[in-house]
Amino acid sequence: MKRRMPICEIVDTSTGSGKLLPGLNRNLTPAQQIIYIYGPNQWKTQNNVDLIEKAGNDYLITPGIAAHKLHIRKLTWNKARKACIQEGGHLAIINSNSEEKILIRILEENKASEAWLGIHEFYEEGGWNTIMDESLEATGYSKWTKMYREDVKVPDDNDGSQHCGSLVVNGGLDNRDCNDVYAFFCEITF
């Protein structure tokens, strides 16, 4: 039986050229593969889950990582969390440096400087967790921005008022007041 090719383009993001790659190049890391979907819902993968149907056409699907969407409209952290749930996902949780690079590129393309993520320290000061109740260290990514201080290993917390986390376009996590309004990343995992 001949395998049907998906209606999509695979783009090499490692060089910044955005050149189309013929077929699926197995030598690329997930951060180097971006799939832009242009067509009917024919692409199926992983346990026959129809990724396009689950994620929708406005999500960026990255093989081996997840599907992400940047909402440019600015909301508080909790309202952003609820908006992602309504779409069938959750606020994004970064699990690797590759995933961080993908999200930073999305921020850059949309000229956004920062976006909410699904991390917080509601339970204990300095005890950062994901919205899935996993410790930040257990996610595989816990790099804080060095935008404000070069020696930073933990967030500054601004007098104990910053309990929600975001990703900054310069790289790394930042802590913010949960009532501030920012763009936000939703994620759908497969």
Image (cartoon, helix red, strand yellow):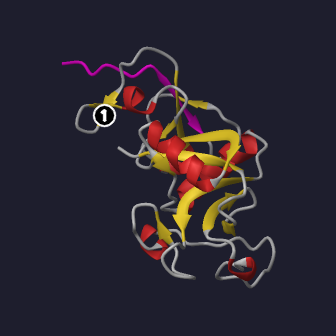
From the image, tell me which residue sits under label 1.
45
Residue 106 is one of the magenta-drawn residues: no
Q: Is residue 118 left or right of residue 40?
A: right
Q: Is residue 71 left or right of residue 68?
A: right
For the point 39% across and 46% down, which residue is it? 189
Q: Secondary structure at mark 1?
A: strand
User: 89 or 146, which lies in front?
Assistant: 89
Question: Is 159 located above or below residue 133 in the figure?
Answer: below
For the point 52% across and 72% down, which residue is it? 122
- In percent of width and height, residue 88 lies at 41, 38
- In percent of width and height, residue 181 lies at 72, 52
Q: Is residue 89 left or right of residue 45?
A: right
Q: Quadrant of the N terminus?
A: top left
Give the residue at the far bottom of this rendering.
151
For the point 62% across and 43% down, which residue is it? 13
Question: Does the rendering let one see residue 15?
Answer: no
- Under mark 1, the amino acid is Thr
Q: Quadrant of the C terminus?
A: top left
Residue 6 is one of the magenta-drawn residues: yes
Question: Is 60 located above or below residue 135 in the figure?
Answer: above
Question: Does the rendering let one see residue 30?
Answer: yes
- In percent of width and height, residue 75 lies at 67, 47
Range drawn in magenta: 1-12
**Which quadrant holds residue 167?**
bottom right
Give the residue at the far left of this rendering.
1
User: 151 or 182, which lies in front?
Assistant: 182
